[in-house]
């Protein structure tokens, strides 16, 4: 596609439920990143994929968070047993080979009640 | 955690005024990026800087990569209503694809 897309745009869930957030990067982009943005805050790095592998998972806040990427394209971020503090906007970005410029999707706003 | 200090945190200006914001780091960055984020949207890249001392313009926007590689500034001239939003500086610590470290953001509001 023309840009990074994410779905759903909004997700409201109950505490304790699992959620899946999806990211479709720009076609041909090899690197994919997940960030989290809490209300009024800057972006916090979660995980980075190069192809289908994740060389850097250092930002995942707990073992309830996991992510995968298949076919070098779509990525899914899964949050198990959601907690209220997981409420945030989850942003995905992708980068083409040989560049540092990350292009962001519109984000998924997650609200845990 | 955050390693980029961005100032000011917020700005209230009148339409037509010039704006200046900056970003400093305790560590060297090899690339500086400036993003703008509108409500409900992801950040959009405004300017990318790749060389120390580099001064780059994009329309009414001008940004510079500090000589020490530890700072950058962004200027907006003759502000207009659509400039409202949050501006973030960001950079990867090393060359190559890597996570970005983001500044804390500068929220720009234009007073009618």
Image (tube, grey):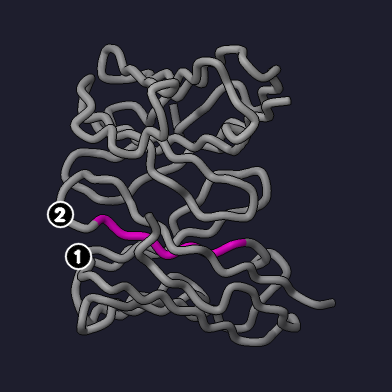
Chain letter of mark 2 equals B
On the image, the x and y values in percent for residue A14 come to: 70, 17
Residue B87 within the segment the image draws in magenta: yes
- Residue B91 vs B109, above or below: the answer is above
**Residue at the image position 23 percent from the left and 70 percent from the top:** B27
What is the C-alpha distance between the residues marked 2 and 1? 7 Å
* Callouts 2 and 1 close, C-beta under 8 Å: yes
For residue B93, what is the image quadrant?
Answer: bottom left
Chain letter of mark 1 equals B
Tag 1, which secondary structure?
Answer: loop
**Residue B62 seen by the camera:** no
- Residue A7 vs A90, above or below: the answer is above
For residue B26, what is the image quadrant?
Answer: bottom left
Q: Which mark is first along the chain, 1 or 2?
A: 1
Residue A20 within the segment the image draws in magenta: no
Q: Quadrant of the C terminus of chain B?
A: bottom right
On the image, the x and y values in percent for residue B66 come to: 27, 81
On the image, the x and y values in percent for residue A54 come to: 23, 27
Q: Which residue is mark 2?
A: B95
Residue B30: image tag: 1
- Direction from residue B42 to residue B96 in the image, left or right: left
**Residue at the image position 56 percent from the left and 54 percent from the top:** A41
**Residue at the image position 61 percent from the left and 21 percent from the top:** A8
The single residue placed furthest to the right in the displayed view is B112
Magenta highlight range: B86-92
On the image, the x and y values in percent for residue B33 come to: 36, 62
Magenta stretch, main secondary structure, is strand
**Residue A40 seen by the camera:** yes
């Amino acid at each position: 596609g023309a840009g990074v897309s994410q779905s759903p745009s909004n997700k409201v869930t109950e505490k304790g439920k699992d959620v899946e957030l999806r990211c479709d990067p720009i076609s041909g982009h090899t690197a994919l990143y997940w960030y989290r943005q809490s209300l009024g805050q800057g972006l916090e790095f979660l995980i980075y994929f190069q192809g289908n592998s994740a060389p850097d998972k250092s930002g995942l806040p707990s073992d309830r968070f996991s992510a995968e990427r298949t076919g070098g394209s779509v990525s899914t971020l899964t949050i198990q047993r959601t907690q209220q503090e997981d409420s945030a906007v989850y942003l995905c970005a992708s980068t083409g080979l040989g560049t540092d410029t990350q292009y962001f999707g519109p984000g998924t706003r997650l609200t845990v009640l | 955690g955050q390693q980029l200090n961005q100032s000011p945190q917020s700005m209230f200006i009148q339409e037509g005024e010039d704006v200046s914001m900056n970003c400093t780091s305790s560590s060297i960055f090899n690339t500086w990026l400036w993003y703008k984020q509108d409500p409900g949207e992801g950040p959009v890249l405004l300017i990318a800087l790749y060389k120390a001392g580099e001064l780059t313009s994009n329309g009414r926007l001008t940004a510079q990569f500090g000589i020490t590689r530890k700072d950058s500034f962004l200027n907006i001239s003759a502000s207009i209503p659509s400039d409202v939003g949050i501006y973030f500086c960001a950079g990867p610590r090393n060359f190559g694809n890597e996570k970005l470290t983001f500044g804390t953001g500068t929220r720009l509001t234009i007073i009618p």
